[in-house]
Amino acid sequence: MTTISPTLSHRPAENQGDNPSPLLPPMRLAIIGGGRGGTALLDALHQIGTIAIIGIADKNPSAPGLRRAQELHVPIYDQVSDLITHQQPSLVLDVTGDPTMRSVLQELVPPGTDIVDGQTSRLLWLLIQHETTLQTELLHAEKLAGIGSFAAGIAHDINNPLQLILGLAENLTDETDLEAVHLQAKDIIEAVKRTTAICRDLTSYSRRASLRPDGLISVNGKLDEALKIARYAVALQDIEIRKHYQPDVVVKGNPDQLLHVFVNLITNAVQAMEHRGTLTLETASGSGTTQVRVSDTGSGIAPELLNRIFDPFFTTKPPGKGTGLGLYNIKNVIHHMHGTIGVDSQVGHGSTFTLTFPEDPGQDPERARP
Ligand SMILES: Nc1ncnc2c1ncn2[C@@H]1O[C@H](COP(=O)(O)OP(=O)(O)OP(=O)(O)O)[C@@H](O)[C@H]1O
Ligand SMILES: [Mg+2]
């Protein structure tokens, strides 16, 4: 199988569309303040290829921004002066809200270095928060658009138990044997429970991703849940499903969003196989990372399209069939989880999407949410 890179790790920094001029050196940005503002800016700006975050400073060692910086391998300083003199930023973003910081910075920064602080840095933070809200809305809109294609699957799955209930109820009208009545009533109850479970799964999937804080998620359980949901969107009966799960694999994130990611990857895989082939789901953890792999034996992706499939609205489906937002949203969720997504594909043979997450040092599988 021809491998593109070993894995085309899709980070926006590598997305050719991002860099307006590859000749310009990246902007060297220092963040002062590791509170909520500093953390949000760090999260958003580190994804931009033309910006190099050269350090963050906060005198409080337990500031959340410092922890996030550690995860992102951004240098951490407790003294602003050390950050400025060691790293020589071209732009300093002050989000401390401390009115005395401007004069401190003006003393420290070399000529030509800009300082953004006060209302301007607050405006930047508000814009970033707004973008996060828009991304969440887009994620939800794309999920709802996808649920439209579930109709046939849902109708089929609800119709089966309904037909059974109808048959049993018809029998009951003539049944005089009390024991037979009891048995058939039990079968009716079971069939009703099956339809209720279908409705419960779908209502829970279609709701807006919860705003609860990120927690530990059991990845194997989430993949199984996603298979159940994906069954409504795509026919799985002629697909061989192989699971290679390492036990107790967990990642940190939002469980609703991760479920959506898995449903999208499985749906894409089955669609690429035109409903016939082998779908392989793998999980593994070790050496500081956790990996999830979704592979198919489908059409594969032409090398010249590999860099475009994560772009918003890119789709090879006929008009009206796909939004082209599936992989774009997946990429955003994975980046939010500090992970990467890679694809390895060969035309005519299939594709493998690999998600790689940093292993959470404090993780305890027992505490993982289903
Ligand atoms: N497993 C896969 N095998 C082959 N091609 C794929 C695979 N996954 C994605 N693609 C390609 O990437 C494109 C973009 O996928 P994405 O999920 O973003 O949107 P879509 O599937 O076209 O639309 P929607 O997700 O709204 O149905 C697809 O149209 C397809 O060309
Ligand atoms: Mg898709």
Image: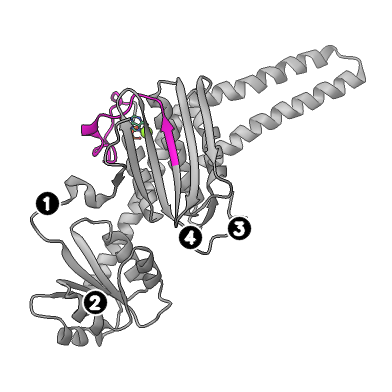
Q: Does the residue at mark 1 contact the one at mark 3 (Cβ under 8 Å)?
A: no
Tell me which segment is drawn in magenta: 293-320
Quickly name the residue at label 3: 367
Q: Position of residue 9 (x, y in %)?
A: 30, 46
The part of the image, by quadrant, that contains residue 190 is top right
Q: Which mark is residue 175?
A: none
Quickly name the residue at label 2: 118
Relative depth, front residue between 359 and 308: 359
* Residue 67 falls left or right of residue 215: left
- Ligand 1 located in image quadrant: top left
* Residue 85 falls left or right of residue 204: left
* Residue 134 falls left or right of residue 207: left
Say which amino acid is labelled 4: Asp
Q: How many marks?
A: 4
Distance of mark 2 from mark 4, alpha carbons? Answer: 35 Å
Say which amino acid is labelled 1: Pro
Q: Is residue 152 magenta?
A: no
